Image (spheres, helix red, strand yellow):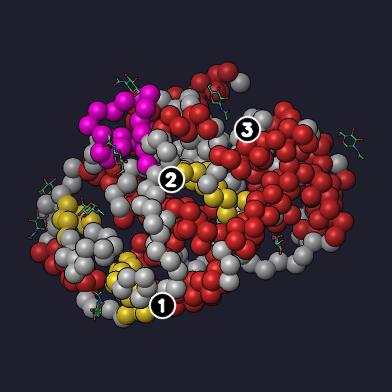
Amino acid sequence: MKVTGRIIRYSLILFVVLESLLLFHHSVRLEIRISRRHHQPQLTTLDRIVTTTENSSREQNASLINHQLIITQSSPLVTLKYPSQHCKDAPVGKVAYIRTHKTGSTTLTHIVNQYGLLRNLSFCLPKSGSLGRYMIYNVTKAKPKMSLLKPLNSSSFNESFPRFSMFTLHTLYDRQGMEKVMEPNSRYITSVRDPVKQFRSAFVYYGFENGFPDEIKKELKSRPIAEKLKEWFRNATSYQQTYKLKNMRGEPRYYYTRNSQINDLGYNMKYIDDKAKISKYISKLAREFDVVLITEHFDESLLLMKKELCWDIEDILYFPKNIRFKKSEPLPPEIQTSIREWNFADLQLFEHFNRTLWTKIRRHGPSFETELIEFKSYLKELGRRCGGEKQVVLKIARPVERNVTIDCHVLKCGEGEMFEKLRKRQYRKQ
Ligand SMILES: *[C@@H]1O[C@H](CO)[C@@H](O)[C@H](O)[C@H]1NC(C)=O
Ligand SMILES: *[C@@H]1O[C@H](CO)[C@@H](O)[C@H](O)[C@H]1NC(C)=O
Ligand SMILES: *[C@@H]1O[C@H](CO)[C@@H](O)[C@H](O)[C@H]1NC(C)=O
Ligand SMILES: *[C@@H]1O[C@H](CO)[C@@H](O)[C@H](O)[C@H]1NC(C)=O
Ligand SMILES: *[C@@H]1O[C@H](CO)[C@@H](O)[C@H](O)[C@H]1NC(C)=O
Ligand SMILES: *[C@@H]1O[C@H](CO)[C@@H](O)[C@H](O)[C@H]1NC(C)=O
Ligand SMILES: *[C@@H]1O[C@H](CO)[C@@H](O)[C@H](O)[C@H]1NC(C)=O
Ligand SMILES: *[C@@H]1O[C@H](CO)[C@@H](O)[C@H](O)[C@H]1NC(C)=O
Ligand SMILES: *[C@@H]1O[C@H](CO)[C@@H](O)[C@H](O)[C@H]1NC(C)=O
């Protein structure tokens, strides 16, 4: 076990070194940077960064430049009559998004990443992105100088206080550790989902049925999910153990199989059956988080987040595809009950934050509903236009008229591509 661990560790180190060299190689290649002139100072456009080598042919160079010209061509204008009040405070540019597993966090990650990308904010990013897909499980243990990319605007890298503005990695929430790497007065956001849906999604994604004995697994292989879940709950405590062994995910931090949301949010899982401690911990989270989004009420949550962070409407636009979960057969009531009992802590967590979400929405009065309808229609229109156009100009009518250019590529790009953009940009400053 020990030897295997060492081999794994050395392979990882070798991998980091190799990848760093590779990135360095990329960064010394020549780049053309073509910026577009803004008609308006408040226009948010993204500079396209194109990489060519010294040996690129004239045609290749020309095609890249033409590509840029196409992007700058005048494009369709969508008018948005945005009804909401102007925010009095300055927009918040220091945000830590603590992601939870299987709650549809990709869309919100994209929104926060896009916000920071367009404003050149520094992200907490591991030097090597391929290691475990953008996660730092324990920020306290991370050695910033070794493992993190330097912030964009710091001349010297203070290892104990690296100070990033944005955080969108997977991590186990640890407030003290987070405060060490984030700018002071950063805001914290997270998202939670109905545990019945979250557990079902995790069950399929992580293959909890691998915990079943082989003959049962074979028998249930092509049976409906409800039957597999029924088998799981026949002996969940035992299956959870065999699942962990079979998947070599025995480490206590991987609580995918039970109450995984509160685990991601840093709860000490030793006390997972202690109802008083759970309730106390949820109150603590409520104090520490500025916004808790509810996956099932995503657009409502985004509007509240926008208000809380004083962002503009264009900052919370997303390409409406990821968030649409496939409609699936509802589970039999008795299985839903089993899931809720098994994920008791997550249920408390979800119910608490769904309640506070709706309390906040009610506080905003009837204008919230109007705003929501508008917002949903922008998203639909944006989705339609960005399907075919490279960019869309949004004319925002209220409270002050302005034009905003949305780069459809940035809006639509995948998680991996987005993180690579962020890493490359920050890597140049090392
Ligand atoms: C460009 O071409 C020259 C001559 O063929 C070659 O020596 C050099 O390595 C090439 N550079 C790159 C970056 O491909
Ligand atoms: C293409 O662009 C690169 C980088 O700007 C430049 O070094 C190279 O000379 C250009 N090639 C031609 C044929 O103009
Ligand atoms: C971000 O950086 C780019 C390139 O350094 C610059 O052109 C752009 O104006 C910056 N954007 C903001 C919002 O500061
Ligand atoms: C992270 O590591 C620190 C120092 O070893 C430890 O005190 C802390 O409990 C860890 N946090 C988590 C969430 O495991
Ligand atoms: C870096 O930029 C952020 C956001 O623009 C700012 O809050 C922070 O004070 C800056 N840090 C340094 C060391 O200049
Ligand atoms: C890093 O920052 C901390 C807190 O501001 C400070 O006490 C410490 O001296 C700094 N270390 C270096 C090497 O600048
Ligand atoms: C659950 O699994 C354990 C360990 O394999 C076993 O001892 C126990 O009898 C099982 N319980 C049921 C109800 O099957
Ligand atoms: C959240 O609470 C609201 C208001 O009580 C309720 O209508 C809604 O169904 C709840 N959402 C979920 C996903 O349970
Ligand atoms: C927005 O763009 C339209 C069309 O190009 C133009 O007529 C209008 O003056 C612009 N508005 C502002 C505030 O720049």
Give the residue type at disc 3: Arg
Mark 2, residue position: 95
- Residue 301 vs residue 222, the one in the foreground: 301
Classify 10 Å Cα crowding around label 1: few (below 14), some (14-19), many (20 and above).
some
- Residue 62 vs residue 164, the one in the foreground: 164
Residue 194 in picture, x, y percent from top left: 69, 55
**Stretch in magenta:** 147-166
Instruction: State yes or no: Cβ of the residue under disc 3 lies below 8 Å from any atom of ligand 4.
Output: yes
Disc on the earlier residue, 1 or 2: 1
Disc 3 from disc 2: Cα separation: 24 Å
Disc on the earlier residue, 1 or 3: 1
- Residue 400 vs residue 233, the one in the foreground: 400
Identified at 40% across, 77% down, the residue is 80
| Residue 27: numbered disc | none
Q: Nearer the viewer, mark 1 or mark 3?
A: 1
Mark 3, residue position: 253
Determine whether, in the image, residue 105 is placed left or right of residue 263: left
Q: Quadrant of ligand 2?
A: bottom left
Give the residue type at disc 2: Val
Pick the quarter of the image with the N terminus: top right
- Residue 170 vs residue 1, the one in the foreground: 170
Marks 3/2 in contact by CB < 8 Å: the verdict is no
Residue 142 visible to the viewer: yes
Is residue 248 one of those drawn in magenta? no
SS state under label 2: strand
SS state under label 3: loop
Determine whether, in the image, residue 310 is placed left or right of residue 22: right
Mark 1, residue position: 81
Disc 1 from disc 3: Cα separation: 47 Å
Residue 50 in picture, x, y percent from top left: 22, 57
Q: Report the predominant secondary structure element of the magenta stretch.
A: loop
